[in-house]
Amino acid sequence: MTYPPPLYDGATGEISATYRPDGTAPELVYPNGTRVHYLSTGASTGGLFGLYRWECGPEVTGPEPHFHRSIAESFYILSGTMRIYDGGRWVDAEPGDYVHVPAGGIHAFKNKSGAPASMLLHFSPGAPREGYFEGLVRVAQMDEEERAAFYRDHDNHWLT
């Protein structure tokens, strides 16, 4: 395996890093209290990846088994215990545990621990997942056709 083609052709480098201090308010807070921090979006990384911090409370939350055709998704547990479905079994992932799901890989996650949990979600390439996260609050108000279009437009393919 070799390195990909250069993304930068300059001779001296440039000042372009992004700093986000701890304590920055989340970009999205769901009615159940789950907080989503948009650390790096596909737009901010030139489509290379998206990275989000997902913080949920003690209630059961998370999607059912599904897959994506165009993106890989990875989970890195920061705190608490998150149940991750790897396509064959549910794993109780704890701080420091990592799960990578290639495009087409069946997966799901649930907080069933009864305690708060947080994790990093990484998507590659950097699809516009913000629209998906923000649209989830409206799914219950969508009719069947609108819901199917929403999931199709956001590359979520449910098994059930």
Image (cartoon, rainbow, N blue to C red):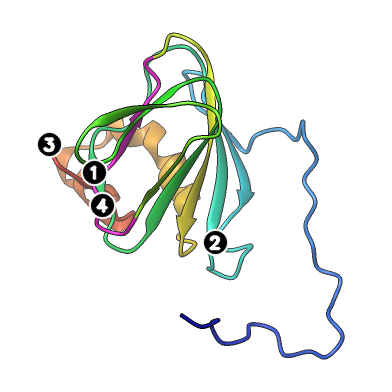
Per the image, is 33 magenta? no
Q: Earlier in the sequence, mark 2 or mark 3?
A: 2
The amino acid type, in three-letter code, at marker 4 is Gly
The stretch of residues the image draws in magenta is 102-112
Q: Earlier in the sequence, mark 4 or mark 2?
A: 2
The amino acid type, in three-letter code, at marker 1 is His
| Residue bearing mark 2 | 42
Number of labelled discs?
A: 4
Per the image, is 104 magenta? yes
| Residue bearing mark 4 | 105
In space, the residues marked 4 and 1 are separated at their CA atoms by 8 Å
Q: Quadrant of residue 10?
A: bottom right
Question: Which residue is the extreme one toward the front?
Answer: 1
| Residue bearing mark 1 | 66
Residue pictured at 30% horizontal, 55% vertical: 155
Badge 3, how many Cα within 10 Å: few under 14, some, many 20+? Answer: few
Residue pictured at 28% horizontal, 49% vertical: 156
Q: Is residue 58 left or right of residue 106?
A: right
Q: Earlier in the sequence, mark 3 or mark 4?
A: 4
